[in-house]
Image: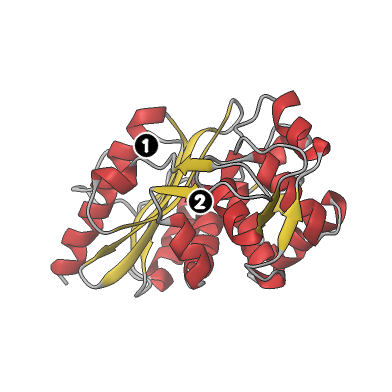
Amino acid sequence: MRIGGFIGSAVLALVVGVASPAAAADAPEVAAKSAYVVDSAGTIHFGKRETRRVPVASLVKVMTAYVVLREARLSDTITITATDVKHATSNGATTAGLKKGERLTVRDLLYGLMLPSGADAANALARRYGPGKTAFVAKMNRTARALGLSDTRYTNPDGLPTPANGGYSTAVDQVKLAERALDNGAFAAVAGTKAHKVTKSSLHRAHTWRNSNKLLSRADGVLGVKTGYTRAAGYCLLFAGERGGKRVVGVLLGDQNERRFDTAERLLDYAGEQIAGG
């Protein structure tokens, strides 16, 4: 299905109050509350409540990484503060295990941000490149508008529940963002890495970060991208893979933990079958 035709049918679906008809009869069953899958040729392979505004948990960190990569040098060094550490621990967030006084490069902090979904890394990066979180979130929202993400608003750089559930987005906007982010070689390298080791030095402790995206180990040709979870958002997964010579990008919002990886694998394979079939 091409985007032009889909837009018309999606509008009709909203008028009559039913889910988008983007999913063909032979498409995989998707229990997530929202979903969207498109390939690099612009063909939509699946849609389910894809324009519904919802919190997206740690998928917010994709925009955090994208903004940082537009402003920072990968070799820039950031000193971790007690506030960075406390931000993650006091909010019960996932963490990269950073300690006060460590000095790490932006490159390493991006791995700490994306793989274990470290809220401490997010805080450090936003603090540096806002400068300050308020200014950084403003940059996130300006970037969203510039990218045409009209149904996306951020309230923090990590997707934590406070304030306002980290903001909101849609399945369509999340896929658009991932497509742009994956065009950046540094982002793609981080998002597709299963594990990253930081060797101990005089500036920092040793760290080993493993990617929470289990899809990287379950299917061939997977490119990333990001997991997320909060009570409000449910389990989320932004994913991408190569199928039939095209890049396929999709998202599942409001799913169950293990099911999201199984569903994403099926959706990638389904898109591959559709691409192969012309």
Does 7 appear above or below 101?
below
Q: Residues within 10 Å of mark 1 (few under 14, many from 20)?
A: many
Residue 18 visible in rendering: no
Q: CA distance from mark 2 to mark 1?
A: 14 Å
**Residue 13 drawn at (x, y percent):** 45, 51
> Is 174 in front, or is 131?
131
**Residue 138 drawn at (x, y percent):** 82, 58
Tell me if 56 is positioned left or right of 146 in this view: left
Name the kind of residue labelled 2 in the image. Answer: Ala
Tell me if 62 is positioned left or right of 241 in this view: right
Q: Residues within 10 Å of mark 2 (few under 14, many from 20)?
A: many
Residue beneath disc 1: 260
Name the kind of residue labelled 1 in the image. Answer: Arg
Check disc 2 and report its element: helix, strand or loop. helix
Between disc 2 and disc 1, the foreground one is: 1
**Tag shown at residue 122:** none
Tell me if 191 is positioned left or right of 52 in this view: left
> Is 74 in front, or is 252?
74
* Residue lying at 76% horizontally and 65% vertically, measured from the top left: 142
Check disc 1 and report its element: helix, strand or loop. helix
Residue beneath disc 2: 171
* Residue lying at 60% horizontally and 32% vertically, measured from the top left: 94
